Image: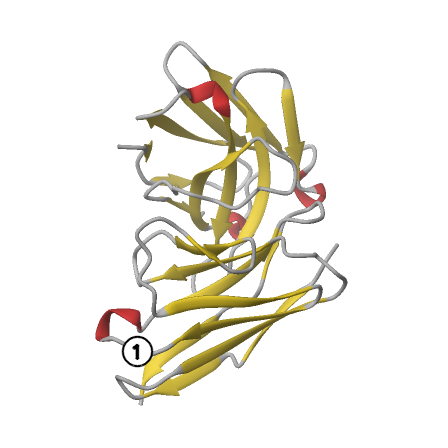
Amino acid sequence: QVQLVQSGAEVKKPGASLKVSCKASGYTFTNYYIHWVRQAPGQGLEWMGLIYPGGDVRNYAQQLQGRVTMTRDASTNTVNMELSSLTSEDTAVYYCARSVLTAHSHWFDPWGQGTLVTVSP
Amino acid sequence: EIVTTQSPATLSVSPGERATLSCRASQSVSSNLAWYQQKPGQAPRLLIYGASTRATGIPARFSGSGSGTEFTLTISSLQSEDFAVYYCQQYDHWPLTFGGGTKVEIK
């Protein structure tokens, strides 16, 4: 079945960088976008950006430009999301999620299980 | 950026009753709107896309309607497993944006 499995929970110091991975299985990796969405404790969902695993296409949310980098490894069907210069505001559960490539079709299904990231001194 | 506003923030409903959730976009998103259900400690689950198309495996008691700026998610007869938080998401414009959520709780 289609599955996205994320790396485990992380605790980071302010100013550090974070890397979360998302391994896809059960479908052709290069036929779909992978998006990242985060959710601060008790809050709603925030779209962070997307990457196309089959080529050099990325689209990052403006508020994260310069701090977020998404990379892909087609040999392992894995997408990575790196976030630098962490602050307490980056404490959240980070999700990866899949969408089709067609324009105006970017709903998310399925989602990874989530990775809790805590930023604390 | 398109702002999507959900109402009410909390909806108290008895099991077996109908629940109606609203999502309003700050400008037209055509029918490019999805709905998700999220239970505590779990990832969101896709319910509806294209404003009204149920995702695979979603029970018929969930239905979506609307276009342009006004959308509705209806749960025709609430089951115990439906008590959760529901989010709408527009994918017509970049950046993709979510509503703030509606919590459906047991009355």
Q: Give the answer, above or below, for where A1 lies relative to A108.
A: above
Name which residue type carries label 1.
Leu
Does B7 appear above or below B81?
A: below
For the question of whether residue B69 can be seen, the reply is: yes
Q: Quadrant of the N terminus of chain A?
A: top left
Of B106 and A95, which appears nearest the observer? B106
Q: Chain of mark 1?
A: B
Query: Dot 1: few (<14), some (14–19), or many (≥20) neighbours within 10 Å?
Result: many
Does residue A119 appear in the picture of this structure? no
Q: Position of residue B38 (x, y in %)?
A: 37, 61
Q: Residue at x 63, y 17 (%)?
A: A56
Which residue is nearer to you in this view: A50 or A43? A50
Placement of B34 over or under B102, stated as above or below: above
Image coordinates of residue A118 in percent, x first then y, are 41, 47
Q: In the displayed structure, would residue B36 be above or below residue B76? A: above
What residue is disc 1 on? B78
Residue at 55% of width from left, 47% of height from top?
Answer: A87
